[in-house]
């Protein structure tokens, strides 16, 4: 059974940076989609970014509009992804979840089969 383990969350001031990590154990997600969602207090879980295999040659990245230009998703290998977050804003405060899909790609929760436990990010103003 695959496990996704996130790390790297914490407390940071507005304008600061953090890098989240997600490592999978138990199975490989080579050429599969891995990504990040977040859930702020009182809000629904939302898509943040994902890296997906495309055209049989490379991984592509997709982002929600609110983080474009500030966040970067990267993939170290088949089982490890990062989310580099710069110019953080208080509205980025949330629990960030790593997710993996074995069936395809999407921005909806139902597209993902595996989930981590989450790592808390708090951005103070």
Image: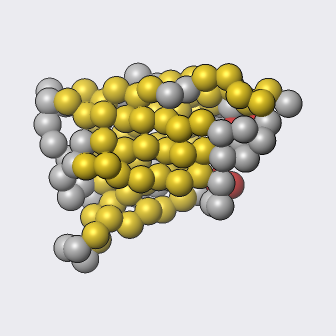
| Residue at figure coordinates x 15%, y 42% from the top left | 28
Say which of 69 and 114 sits in front.
69
Residue 115 x, y percent position in the rendering: 35, 32
How far across and down, in percent of the image, does residue 103 sit?
Answer: 22, 54
What is the image's colouring? secondary structure
Point 54% across, 46% down: residue = 84
- Which residue is situated farthest in the right direction here? 125
Q: Quadrant of the C terminus?
A: top right
* 30 is higher (above) or lower (below) than 41: below
121 with respect to 5 (left or right): right
Does the image show residue 38? yes
Residue at image position (14%, 37%) is: 27
Q: Residue furthest bottom?
A: 55
- Whether 120 is drawn above or below 108: the answer is above
Q: Is residue 30 left or right of residue 52?
A: left
State how many labels appear: 0
Using the image, determine if residue 13 lies above or below residue 15: above
Give the left or right position of residue 56, taking residue 11 as reference: left
Residue at (24%, 42%) from the top-left corner?
A: 79
Can residue 112 be seen by looking at this rendering? no
Q: Quadrant of the N terminus?
A: top left
Residue nearest the viewer, comparing 33 with 122: 122
Pick the front one: 10 or 119: 10
Q: Residue 112: image x %, image y %? A: 33, 44
Image spot of residue 23 (x, y percent) = 30, 34
Q: Which one is nearer the viewer's eye here, 117 or 17? A: 17
């Amino acid at each position: 059974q695959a496990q996704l383990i996130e790390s790297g969350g914490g407390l940071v001031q507005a304008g600061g940076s953090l890098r989240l990590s997600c490592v999978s154990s138990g199975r490989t997600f080579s050429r599969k989609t891995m990504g990040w969602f977040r859930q702020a207090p009182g809000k629904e879980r939302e898509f943040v970014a994902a890296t997906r295999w495309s055209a049989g040659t490379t991984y592509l990245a997709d982002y929600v509009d609110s983080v474009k230009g500030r966040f970067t998703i990267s993939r170290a290998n088949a089982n490890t992804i990062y989310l580099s977050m710069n110019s953080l804003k208080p509205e980025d405060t949330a629990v960030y979840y790593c997710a993996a899909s074995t069936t395809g790609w999407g921005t909806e929760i139902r597209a993902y089969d595996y989930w981590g436990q989450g790592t808390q990010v708090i951005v103070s103003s």
